[in-house]
Amino acid sequence: MAEEVFAEAGYSGARVDEIAARMSTTKRMIYYYFGSKEELYVAVLERAYRGIRDAERAMDLGDLPSAEALRRVAELTFDHHHRHPSFIRLVAIENIHHAEFLKKIGTLRELGTPAASLLEEILERGRSDGSFRGGVEALDVHMVISAFCVFQIANNHTFSYLFDYDMRSKAQRAHNRQVLGDIVVAWLSPVR
């Protein structure tokens, strides 16, 4: 509930009264557990970021060919963002605040390590078996996947209005999910 309020109104616009009402609790209880609105917001951010990282860590890519493993990571990110649009709004809000609150989460930088490590492992495997070219870093791949996925959520309303193209519709989601996988696999394929 708190995540929804912060995602809808931003940190500055969110009211603890509204959060308490949605949670069927009192402001006093929220302050008892979290201490302040800021600490609640920081907890919401941490939980949101942990959600995607936990999903990545839970992936079993085992013996999948490297191209299929990479496609699965891209699809997982795509699906996560569509299931959790409030995560994208929180990230946007945090960027408006220059990551002020994100910087208060000491363990958060470590949370990004599994994503980079997973991608690096897949890239190394793909370079070794000849299915991926060199010269591309895991962070490059992460950025391309994230940019495509974030765009789907952050720009849906304006894009939908301007181009009559609803990225959240079931058909477009399926299409765009496929496109993302195709993009990252084709980009990393060796130049022939």
Image: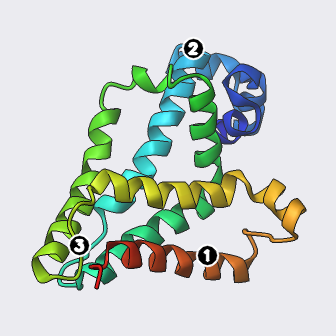
Residue 47 spot, x, y in % from top left = 46, 41
Mark 3 or mark 1, earlier in chain:
3
Whole-number angstrom distance, CA of label 3 to CA of label 2: 49 Å
Give the color scheme: rainbow, by chain, secondary structure or one colour.
rainbow
The residue nearer to you, when weighing 89 against 181, is 181
Q: Is residue 191 left or right of residue 6?
A: left
**Looking at the rendering, in which quadrant would you find the C terminus?**
bottom left
Residue 69 spot, x, y in % from top left = 30, 77
Kindly identify the residue that appears in the image at 27 percent across and 62 percent down: 119
Query: Which residue is the site of mark 2?
Result: 36
In the image, residue 34 above or below residue 74: above
Kindly identify the residue that appears in the image at 29 percent across and 59 percent down: 57
Dots 3, 1 in contact, CB < 8 A: no
Element carrying mark 1: helix
Residue 177 spot, x, y in % from top left = 56, 76
Q: How many marks?
A: 3
Query: Which residue is the site of mark 3?
Result: 133
Select label 3 or label 1 by which is in front.
Answer: 3
Select label 2 or label 1 by which is in front.
Answer: 1
Query: Which residue is the site of mark 1?
Result: 176
Residue 59 in view, yes or no: yes
Q: Amino acid at mark 2?
A: Ser
Whole-number angstrom distance, CA of label 2 to CA of label 1: 40 Å
Query: Residue lying furthest front in this view?
Result: 192
Q: Amino acid at mark 1?
A: Asn
